[in-house]
């Protein structure tokens, strides 16, 4: 229960939330709506927050892809989900462009390009961290689809580099800094 509480707290503080749901379980007519973790009041409250996306993953495992968007929307209504639903497949990359476009549009709409964001970076440290972030993102882009773990590590590296600029750094970064001084593992 403590882990769930912490996950909910972290999600509440996030700028953007992506809730991954197995499409086969979500769209299976034999599953009762009450069986869904989404019926939990805390999770439901998270889903009602702005900048929240529900991603139906593994749609390639469904028997038919006909009408997948309509089925996804019907499922969302049955779960009282008001945010955007995006069906995707990691196996055949279906829906990834739609998800990336929705995220980009949401970021652009919510945060735009303010005058402060257009100012040149004058701090060398910020430029270096942004360069590190770009290098991690370039590496992520070049990693094959079957190397999910390596891709996740590259995204984590990009996130850490940005966190060093914004000041938003996760617990892993704190532990890394702490244990880098000692010859022991986490």
Image (tube, rainbow, N blue to C red):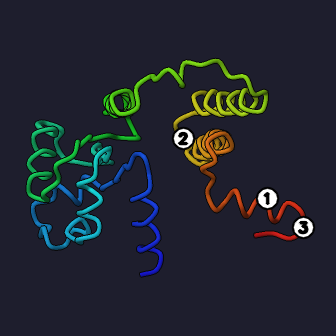
Residue 93, percent from left and from top: 38, 33
Residue in the image at 43% along x and 66% along y: 9
Q: Is residue 6 visible?
A: yes
Q: Do the residues labelled 3 and 2 touch (CB within 8 Å)?
A: no
- Real-space Cα separation, disc 2 to disc 1, in angstroms: 31 Å
Q: Quadrant of residue 178?
A: bottom right
The numbered dot on residue 8 is none
Image: 33 above or below 97: below
Q: Residues within 10 Å of mark 1 (few under 14, many from 20)?
A: few
Residue in the image at 23% along x and 63% along y: 44
The residue closer to the viewer here, 141 or 29, is: 141
Residue 64, percent from left and from top: 16, 42
Image: 175 above or below 19: below
Residue in the image at 29% along x and 43% along y: 60
Disc 3 designates what residue? 182
**Secondary element type, mark 2:** loop
Q: Quadrant of residue 159?
A: top right
Residue 113, percent from left and from top: 45, 22
Q: Are marks 2 and 1 in contact (CB under 8 Å)?
A: no
The numbered dot on residue 177 is 1
The answer to which of marks 1 and 3 sits earlier in the sequence is: 1
**Secondary element type, mark 3:** loop
The residue closer to the viewer here, 134 or 68, is: 134
Disc 2 designates what residue? 146
Q: Residues within 10 Å of mark 2 (few under 14, many from 20)?
A: few
């Amino acid at each position: 229960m403590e882990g769930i509480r912490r996950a909910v707290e972290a999600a509440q503080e996030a700028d953007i939330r992506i809730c991954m749901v197995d499409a086969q379980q979500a769209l299976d007519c034999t599953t009762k709506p009450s069986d869904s973790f989404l019926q939990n009041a805390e999770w439901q409250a998270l889903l009602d927050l702005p900048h929240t996306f529900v991603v139906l993953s593994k749609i390639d495992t469904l028997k038919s892809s006909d009408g997948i968007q309509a089925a996804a929307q019907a499922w969302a209504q049955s779960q009282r989900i008001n945010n955007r639903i995006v069906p995707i497949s990691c196996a055949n990359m279906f829906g990834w462009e739609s998800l990336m476009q929705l995220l980009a549009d949401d970021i652009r709409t919510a945060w735009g390009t303010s005058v402060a964001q257009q100012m040149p970076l004058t701090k060398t440290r910020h430029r270096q961290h942004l360069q590190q972030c770009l290098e991690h993102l370039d590496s992520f882009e070049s990693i094959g689809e079957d190397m999910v773990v390596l891709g996740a590590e590259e995204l984590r590296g990009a996130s850490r580099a940005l966190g060093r600029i914004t000041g938003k750094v996760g617990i892993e970064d704190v532990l890394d800094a702490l244990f880098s001084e000692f010859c022991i593992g986490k």
